[in-house]
Structure formats: structure tokens, C-alpha cells
Amino acid sequence: MSDARLREEICRYGRSLFERGLTPGSSGNISLRLEDGGWLVTPTNASLGFLDPARISRLDGEGRLLSGDKPTKEIPLHTALYDTRGSARAIVHLHSTHAVALTMLPEIDPRAALPPMTPYYLMRAGETALVPYYRPGDPAVADAIRGLAGKYSSVLLANHGPVVAGDSLEAAVFATEELEETAKLYLLLRNLNPRYLSPAQVNDLTKTFGLDLPSHHDHGHD
């Protein structure tokens, strides 16, 4: 896909996410990894709903700005996820309401922020890690993500929002949307003793669709 087409794709998906209220104001950012090792990334203080393809930041493989506006200050978290998730080709970071709310609840397991509620949550987002709060743009967030050793494609930043990697921009967007909807479901059903997917059902999904779930790495197929 040409550089111009990739820029248009970033703008199209960004507008869709913004118009549906998934990231307000100038929050959120999107990046795409290019074949030469460089990136396209949304600029700092840019609304995802009003991106200009020509002003999207073009970085080289070392993160140096080659053209376009100054990039988002969240470059460290994108870099860390690309460095540890070899299959990642795109990353979406939003400030979506339900995912942010989820990070503030006391019972959330940092190794599995959401239970196995639906098959498509596991199929799109896998399992989700929660990392502690860091101020936006703090390079320490990169260390926290690197500490996950690439096991997770979806990560929640406490009091901040989701960061989701995919093997394409479409995959990263769809996974982010699935994460947000699952967080919404969790909040709707919290304290109501809902029925989640059983270990056998999760194993069936893992086997059938070849899912790469961190819990199955660490503990075997329960």
C-alpha cells in the first residue's frame, strides 16, 4: 500500500473512532510501522477526527522526525510495544470511557484486566494487561510495557486508556473496539455474578483459532 494510501487509512480510522466518541478532544494516537522500519504516527495535540494526511508525522527507524508535524508525546509507549511485539504493524491508543473506567477498579488483575466474557474479546484482543499510572509521555511507561515481554497485544494504562497492537491498522482498531465494548459489558454486569466463558470454552477457542493467550503460556492449558 502506498504512503499516501496509508496516510488516508490513518485519517479514516481516526475519524471513525472520534465520531463514535471513543477518544475525545485531541486525545489518542495511531501509528503504523513501515517496511523500511520507519513509522507514520499522528501528531501531538491533533484530534483523530480532523487529521490532515499531509501533516502526519513520518519518523525513521530511530524515531527521528523526517516530515510532517511534531509527533505525539506517546512515542515511548508505541516504541516499547513495537520492540516487544514483533508481529505488530500498527498501534492504536485511545482514552475510551469504559476502558479507562475499568483501570480504576480495585479488583482488576494486572495480568488479566478482563475475564473471558465473549469469544470475540479473546479472538480480537486476547488477554489484557494493566500497567500502573505514569504521566502521559513519561518514558517510564515504556519500561512497564517492556516488562510484559511482548506477551500482550492489548494493554491498559491505569487512569489513562488502552494501547493495542495489531498486524494491520484494521486489526488494531477492531481489537481496540472489542476491548472497549468488553469493558462496557464488565461495568454493566459488575457485582451481578455473570456467567463467563468456562476454561473448556476458552481452550476450545484457543485450539480452533490458534489464539496466543498469555495465561496459556504461563500456566499451560487449564
Image: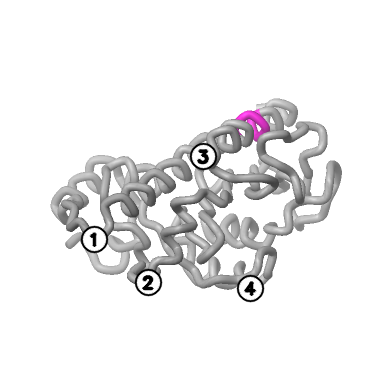
Chosen colour scheme: one colour
User: For numbered disc 3, what is the local secondary structure?
Assistant: helix
Residue 136 is left or right of residue 186, and the answer is right
Q: Nearer the viewer, mark 2 or mark 1?
A: 1
Q: Nearer the viewer, mark 3 or mark 1?
A: 1
Instruction: Name the residue at 49% across, 50% down.
Output: 97
Residue 124 x/y as whole percent: 39, 43
Check disc 2 and give the amino acid type.
Pro
Q: Mark on residue 173?
A: 3
Graded by Cα atoms within 10 Å as few (under 14), some (14 to 19) or many (20 or more), the crowding at tag 2 reads few
User: Circle 1 is placed at which residue position?
Assistant: 191
Q: Mark on residue 106?
A: 2
Front residue (pair 31, 28): 28
Residue 46 x/y as whole percent: 74, 44
Q: Main structural element of the magenta stretch: helix, strand or loop?
A: helix
Q: Quadrant of the N terminus?
A: top right
Q: Quadrant of the C terminus?
A: bottom left
Instruction: Name the residue at 18% across, 46% down.
Output: 204
Tell me, yes or no, whether the two marked residues, 1 and 4, touch with CB atoms within 8 Å: no
| CA separation in Å, label 3 and label 4 | 25 Å
Vertical position of residue 61 compared to residue 120: above or below: below
Region rendered in magenta: 9-13
Q: Nearer the viewer, mark 3 or mark 2?
A: 2
User: Circle 4 is placed at which residue position?
Assistant: 140
